[in-house]
Image (spheres, rainbow, N blue to C red):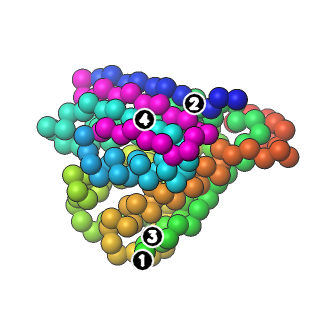
Amino acid sequence: MNRTAEAERNTKETKIRLLLNLDGTGRTELHTGIGFFDHMLDGFARHGLFDLKVRVDGDLHVDSHHTIEDTGIVLGGALREAVGDKKGIRRYGSCILPMDEALVLCAVDLSGRPYYMSDVSFTVPRLGDMDTEMVREFFYAVSCSGQMNLHFKFLSGSNNHHMCEAMFKAFAKALDAAVSYDERITDVLSTKGSL
């Protein structure tokens, strides 16, 4: 089965092209115009072993909001398409990921129902050229567009770069687990019979 998806979004604020392969090796081509965001997406793809190509032409003369939020919308939609009918996948995934002093828990349920929760808060307004308030907006957009439950729990940390990077990498590992196959699951892992 080829679990890839190609997606586009064209508005007055952003033009986005994205290609996602769930069964990749972590290869990336990232051009969002926001260096720190590219760094986070690279960590997500490499640690989830997803191949990810993203090209964004966004209204960065305004700020980073539309570029980051819309990328989350497109990524979530591509993920939903690539995972397909969800037959045979584990559906759930979680990871407690350390990055130096930072420790973040991420849990994912590919339930078909969007829900986002996080208690991670940052103490600086920006990381490089990315507003830290956009971390929430990105993951919220991914969870809604991807129709998944997505939870983050902050366990420890003081360095904002480490905290943010731990979130992206923990999400990658949790998502990789959720989309992986289990030969014991022959249909959809749900009492409803569909997700």
Check disc 3 and report the residue beneath it: 99
Question: Residue 163 sits in which quadrant?
Answer: bottom left
Residue nearer the viewer, 104 or 41: 41
Q: Looking at the image, can residue 177 be seen?
A: yes
Q: Secondary structure at mark 2?
A: strand
Rendering coords of residue 169 (x, y %): 48, 57
Check disc 4 and report the residue beneath it: 53
Rendering coords of residue 41 (x, y %): 40, 47
What's the residue type where badge 4 is placed?
Lys
In space, the residues marked 2 and 3 are separated at their CA atoms by 29 Å
**Residue shown at 61%/59% (left/top)?**
94
Looking at the image, residue 121 lies above or below residue 73: below
| For the residues bearing labels 3 and 1, Cβ distance under 8 angstroms | no
Q: Is residue 13 magenta?
A: yes
Q: Which numbered circle lies on residue 4?
A: 2
Rendering coords of residue 157 (x, y %): 40, 75
- The residue segment tinted magenta is 12-32
| For the residues bearing labels 2 and 1, Cβ distance under 8 angstroms | no
Q: Which numbered circle lies on residue 101?
A: 1
What's the residue type where badge 2 is placed?
Thr
**Residue shown at 45%/63% (left/top)?**
166
In space, the residues marked 4 and 3 are separated at their CA atoms by 25 Å
In space, the residues marked 2 and 1 are separated at their CA atoms by 35 Å
What's the residue type where badge 1 is placed?
Glu
**Residue shown at 38%/61% (left/top)?**
164
Q: Secondary structure at mark 3?
A: strand
In space, the residues marked 4 and 2 are separated at their CA atoms by 11 Å
Counting labels gives 4
